[in-house]
Amino acid sequence: MAVKGKKRKRTSNRVTLEDIARYCDVSKATVSRVLNGHLNEFPVSEEMIQRVKAAAEQLGYRPNRLARAIRNQRTNLIGLSFIHIDYQSMAEDKVAYENQVMGQFTNCILSHPGFKDYDLVIHDREELKDRALQEADFKSDLLEGLIYLTPSEDHREFLDVASKEFPIVLLGQIEGAEEKVPCIDINNRKMAAKAVDHLLESGRKNILLLIPDKLQHISCIQDRIRGYRDALEAKDIKVSDEFIRSVRSLKDNVENFFSDLRCIDEIDAIFCPTDNLAALCIPALKACGKSIPGDIAIIGFDDLPFAQHTTPPLSTVRRPVDKQAHAAIDLLLKILKKEIPYEPGFHEIETELVIRSSTQID
């Protein structure tokens, strides 16, 4: 829509309400009412509304968030906190974990239609063993609410205190947290048990649980480990410590692990609580002369995009990142808009096994 009006002198690179008012030959108050949605304060014609909006778009106007925050006593800032894992030289895992999982969560949140009036503050938190997280770590960000990914037991006290300062939605679960804050997650324990059940039902008996060492303190990984135990115990199969191992999940470490594993000829299946580790197992086992799934079946967890492209394609548990992220931001936005009360509870996201060739013999 073309806009007729007075030409303006540019005094800075930032387009202001005064610039638009001068361009449209109307008052600054009228422009403010139109762009801030306060049309009920004073009648403004539809023609004027469209004219002001078109001018704002044409001139490249962007709201001054600081001024709006002071005026409305709101920052419209939502935090997204996720774990920063110090992998040091473990670049492959760092990229896989942060870019594939956290990137998916971030993109899904930003694409939520209700998020357009908000900005996202990314908090890449350090997992410091010598200092617990503090509510002050987040307060300087002036957040209105926080989506908190991959909690661990060490965060329980922080979540209890911080949730009294601003709404927190937990993407993940630690025992008892649903009594303090709203939690959204799949049932990691139940789905891990289903994955191991699939291996048992296909005739596998000696199932190795291989845990990524750097992730085993995270609550979802702990639940997946519990699910492995649940499945075996439900079939009256003794859980052997020999078949529960951890590994630093770089390719070289995985290959060395299998070449040194004394029970390699006993195991006929492997459950990995992450796809990243499961995918590394495939070439490592082949290097040891094992066929997949003939000698050893492998199943992972998460259904990351690469899982269907391994050779053979990887069986896994689907982690519906889009559903989890949209459910979390939808819940938090409704709380911030006071459409629903801020109440604790567990919101389970349904998911499924994805069976591919790494566990099925044609």
Image (tube, helix red, strand yellow):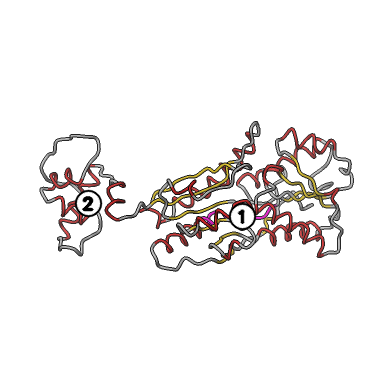
- Which kind of residue does numbered mark 2 sit on? Lys
> Which percent across, then down, holds residue 314?
70, 48
Highlighted range, magenta = 316-325
Secondary structure category for the residue under label 1: loop
Please state the horizontal and vertical placement of residue 309, each as a whole percent of the image: 65, 44
Disc 1: CA contacts within 10 A as few (<14), some (14-19) or many (>=20):
many
Three-letter amino acid code at the position of disc 1: Arg
Label 1: which residue? Answer: 319
Residue 226 percent location from the top left of the image: 74, 57
Q: Is residue 77 left or right of residue 36?
A: right
- Give the residue at x 65% y 46%: 307
Task: Describe the element under mark 2 as helix, strand or loop.
Answer: helix
Kindly identify which numbered label has been placed on residue 350: none
Comes first in the chain, label 2 or label 1: 2
User: Which residue in the structure is indicated by mark 2?
Assistant: 53
Q: In the image, residue 210 lies at what x, y percent?
A: 76, 46
Horizontal relation, residue 132 to residue 245: left or right: left
User: In the depicted view, which residue is nearer to us: 260 or 282?
Assistant: 260
Residue ID at (86%, 53%): 240
Taking the image as shown, residue 104 lies to the left or right of residue 210, namely left
Question: Which residue sits at x=23%, y=44%?
Answer: 58
